[in-house]
Each structure stands twice: as C-alpha cells, then as structure tokens.
Amino acid sequence: MALEDLTDPSAVLRALEEFRGLGQRNFLKKYGFGSSRGWMLVDADGHEYDAKAIIGAAHGYQYPAQGPLPQSDFHGGQPTARKLRELGFEILEPTTRRNSVWTRDELILALELYVRHRPSLPDDRHPDVIELSSLLNRLARTAISRSEGSFRNANGVAMKLQNFRSLDPSQKGKGLSKGGKAEVELWKLFAEDPERLRSVAKAIRAAVTGVQNFPTPEPEGEDAEEGKILTRLHQIRERDYRIVERRKLQALRANGALHCDACGFNFSLKYGDRGNGFIECHHAKPVSGLQPGEKTKLNDLILLCANCHRMVHSRRPWLSLEELRQIIISD
Ligand SMILES: [Zn+2]
Ligand SMILES: [Zn+2]
C-alpha cells in the first residue's frame, strides 16, 4: 500500500467531491491530515483542495479493502504533486499561492458579500462563499489584477468576511483580527452606502465574466475607488481610437479648435503644428456604471489637456470636471 498504487483519476474525482461536500476542515479531520502547507490541487472551477489529503482519500476509493492512505505513509510536496499531475490534475506550488495580498477588487467583492449577509456570517461551505472563491480565481486568471497567480479558497474568503465583521460597529467584539489598511478604507467608503457597494460589485462581476482579456494600459495615477478592473474598463474606453477621433471631430466642428474643457489649454496654440489635433479624452461616466461591451456615447467623453487629465486620475477619489474646474479657479 503506497503512493505509487494510486492510478485511477476517477478515485481522485470522488475524493474531490467528498472534500467539497464536507468542507476543508471536516475532510482533513476525517482522514487525519493536517493542512498540506500550500500544495493544493485546483480544479477547473478554481476550487482548491489539500493535495496530500486528496491522495490519501483517493487511495481508499480505489482500494476500498485497504482503505485510505494515512498521512505518515507518504510524502506530501513534490511526490504528491507529481502523482496528481500524472493523473491529469493541476497542482499549485506553495510559492505561487500563499500570502498574496488581497487586491481592492477582491476586497470590494468580499465586503459586498459580508454586507449582503449581515448579521449572519456565512462559512466556507456556504454556496455564496464558494461561488465568490471561484469568481476570484477566475479573476486572478484574467491577469487584470495584481493578484495574478494567487488563489482564494473558500476558507480564505470566509476568513476575509470575519475581518470585515471585526470592523463592523454593529457586531461589536465579534470576528477575526482586524483587516489591514485597505479593509478599513473600504469599510469607511462603502459600508454605509450599500447601494453603491452593490452596484460596484455588480459592475466588477460583469467585467470579470464579460471580458476575458483586457489589454493592459500603463498605470497612470491611482486606480478608481471602485478597483482595478473598472479602472481598466475606463482606460480602455478613453483610448478607443475610433470614438476618441469622433469626439474630437465633433468639437472641431462646434468650436473650430480643441481645447481643454477644464483649463482651456489649446495644444496647437502653444506647440504650433506639433500640437495640431492633440487633446485627450476623459470618460466622465461614473466608473461603477461601466459594463463590458456597452457602447461609449460621444457625450460620455470630455476633452482634457494632458495635465488636467493626469490630475483627475492622480489620486482617489478621481475628480469630476466640476471639481477640477473649482480647483483651477480657486488657484
Ligand atoms: Zn487642462
Ligand atoms: Zn480619464
């Protein structure tokens, strides 16, 4: 009875099914395994399973008479990974997945889940927690987020909900150690505005599922309050050559010149020929209202000089045209 005897992928599949049914903690307890220190099997939906314990259980499914392989009978880590890969499964090494910091997008989605269920606190077997875990793993694979390569299992999501609970004044004293600075900031920003939180989370979800490959524009300034994904959607719209050219034509026809809607700067007056036809477009529609695939309307775009545009995006929250004008006037 040994690791090498395991040859049947369907035995592994049955172990995965049992793992999902019991939840991580109960599964490990039933088979007498500790956590596998980061070696995880990940399935097509992004669910994670402790690799070594899965081998132990799968052995029992393939050889019911001999039963599961006990933890002490074989090595975790490389040998376990090799065996599971041989059987066609994907294994994540500890370094690719542990301790990656939650991105703003991920935190917003977790906060929305927390607020939606409050005052009850779903655990790692709750369907909504499992669903979010798989969505976050899909998000990591779209490589928009800095969390690229990180994986969030249901347990990690459930713990994040506990972090948020500890920040919740209505749940005094409950929950797991306070989250970091980012959690505190998001709590202040969104917790008292569930309406906005819901619409931002909805837009992020639509973007994750609707757009598989974002081009990656250079970062400039800070991401929007609503996270990186919606920031990218915003930038993609501003750089859509066709609509931007149409918007500039519209302005040329109306005013005979292109100038900054905020400060009046005119590139061709300042730079002569070289500045002819130059101006940037800023997408003025609220970032949380962006949907992938939705057409940009000409009126959504305002014209800004490069300086003003940078100032809009330089810090959270991004400025509206009116706010930018106020700053310029009061100077
Ligand atoms: Zn300007
Ligand atoms: Zn912009």
Image (spheres, rainbow, N blue to C red):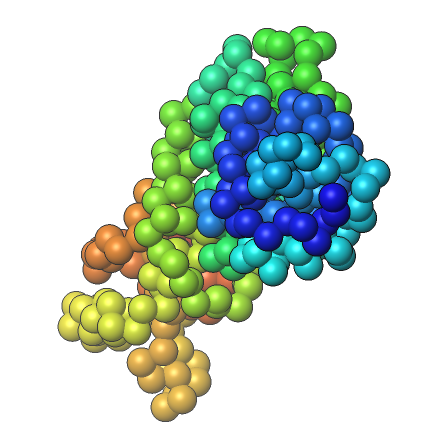
Furthest residue toward left: 253
Quarter placement of the N terminus: top right
Q: Which residue is drawn at 36% across and 72% down?
A: 279
Residue 110 percent location from the top left of the image: 53, 32
Q: Quadrant of residue 241?
A: bottom left
In-front residue for pair 75/65: 65
In the displayed structure image, the side of residue 106 where residue 198 appears, left or right: left
In the displayed structure image, the side of residue 211 where residue 191 appears, left or right: right
Q: Report if residue 319 is visible in the image.
A: no
Residue 169 percent location from the top left of the image: 63, 12
Furthest residue toward right: 72
Q: In this view, does 137 lie above or below 19?
A: below
Residue 306 percent location from the top left of the image: 46, 69
In-front residue for pair 46/288: 46
Residue 186 percent location from the top left of the image: 58, 33
Q: Is residue 322 above or below residue 68?
A: below
For the image, the number of numbered tags is 0
In-front residue for pair 49/46: 49
Q: Which residue is drawn at 55% across and 63% down?
A: 219
Q: Report if residue 32 is visible in the image.
A: yes
Furthest residue toward bottom: 273
Q: Residue at x 50, y 45 (%)?
A: 10
Q: Residue at x 43, y 67 (%)?
A: 215
